[in-house]
Image (cartoon, grey):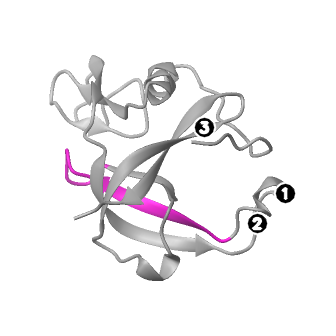
Amino acid sequence: MSAQSNFPYPIPEYGSEPYWAACNKLSLVMQQCADCKNFRWQPAPLCTFCSGEEFAWTPLSGRGRITTWTTVIHPVHPAAVERVPYVVVEVELEEQAGLRMLSNLVGSDPDSIAVGALVTVDFVKQVPGQMLPVFRLATP
């Protein structure tokens, strides 16, 4: 979990602070509607399924499957020059069909990645100390 000093870091927006605080505790959480019990990503004031206003930040297992991925070979930011190539994945989390998030896949050769591969969440430290969720291929 080494810090990446020159890469842009997230600035929590209103309402997402509990998500980032949980990441700093090495926990992946998402809003879960109090009415219909569906999870939603990204954080929002209303449930995207039933328009419910009440929710709880609920811990997730951090396990899922890759639904799509790409290897970035051209840096999109000057700070990414030293990082290319890197892999961006869309992961469907096991808690709910269709519950997907984007992140990086770390620790894997891009040639070993496949749609449907099992992954698990991990965290990397970003300057000024914010932990970011990333994924790794799950070990059998």
Which residue, given by chain and number where applicable, does mark 1 sit on? 78
Image location (x, y in percent) of residue 120: 33, 52
Q: Is the C terminus in the top left, top right, bottom left or bottom right quadrant?
A: bottom left
Task: Please check the rendered image and state whether residue 88 is part of the magenta-colored stretch, yes or no.
Answer: yes
- Name the amino acid type tagged 1: Pro
Q: Classify 82 as above or below 3.
A: below
| Amino acid type, mark 2 | Pro
Amino acid type at image mark 3: Lys
Which residues make up the magenta segment?
85-99
The numbered dot on residue 125 is 3
Q: Earlier in the sequence, mark 1 or mark 3?
A: 1
Please name the residue shown 20% across and 47% down the image.
96
Mark 3: which secondary structure? Answer: strand
Q: Residue at x 50, y 75 (%)?
A: 109
Q: Which dot, 1 or 3, sits closer to the camera?
A: 3
Residue lying farthest to the left in this orientation: 36
